[in-house]
Amino acid sequence: MSEINKNEEYNPDIVSLVDDEGKEYIFEVLDAVETDEARYLALLPQYTDPQAMLDDSGELIIVKVGEDNGEEYFYEIEDDDEYETIADAFVDRLQDRFEIDEQ
């Protein structure tokens, strides 16, 4: 059994995304995967409303990272094969740290 260092603080990497209608969403970045073609993030939604947290499906949001004029942006992975490959990579990486139920 390992001992927890009481001086260590948990400092999650938080990102804020705004949709086309101006609604803001807050996510914690759980992990990042980089391939020869692109970089991807596994995001977990964060809520201020406890009921919204309970109602959440618990699924990770996986986005592709792009760059335009030196600014980073995130977008959906539209290719099903690309999404499956990246999702599998995240599951492999995260299943040791988190309890993941593969369905």
Image (cartoon, rainbow, N blue to C red):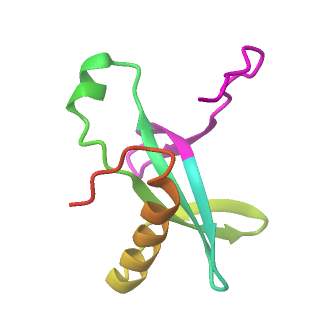
Residue 78 place in picture, x, y as percent: 37, 77
Most foreground residue, 24 or 60 = 60
Q: Specify whether residue 36 is painted magenta.
A: no
In the drawing, does residue 19 fall left or right of residue 31?
Answer: left
- Can residue 72 be seen here? The reply is yes
- What residue is rendered at 31% in x and 49% in y? 59
Name the quarter where the C terminus is drawn: bottom left
Name the quarter where the N terminus is drawn: top right
- What residue is rendered at 30% in x and 42% in y? 58
Q: Which quadrant of the structure image shows residue 22?
A: top left
In the drawing, does residue 4 fall left or right of residue 23?
Answer: right
Question: As displayed, is residue 99 above or below residue 89?
Answer: above
- What residue is rendered at 24% in x and 42% in y? 57
Question: As displayed, is residue 90 above or below residue 3?
Answer: below
- Can residue 75 be seen here? The reply is no
Residue 52 place in picture, x, y as percent: 27, 26
Residue 92 place in picture, x, y as percent: 46, 65
How many labels sit on residues?
0
In the drawing, does residue 64 fall left or right of residue 70?
Answer: left
Magenta-colored span: 1-29
- What residue is rendered at 41% in x and 68% in y? 87
Instruction: Looking at this view, name the residue that lies furthest to the front.
Output: 1
Instruction: Looking at this view, name the residue that lies furthest to the top.
Output: 6
Most foreground residue, 68 or 87 = 87
Most foreground residue, 21 or 79 = 79
Question: As displayed, is residue 94 above or below residue 82?
Answer: above
Q: Which quadrant of the structure image shows residue 9?
A: top right
Residue 56 place in picture, x, y as percent: 25, 36
Question: As displayed, is residue 57 above or below residue 48?
Answer: below
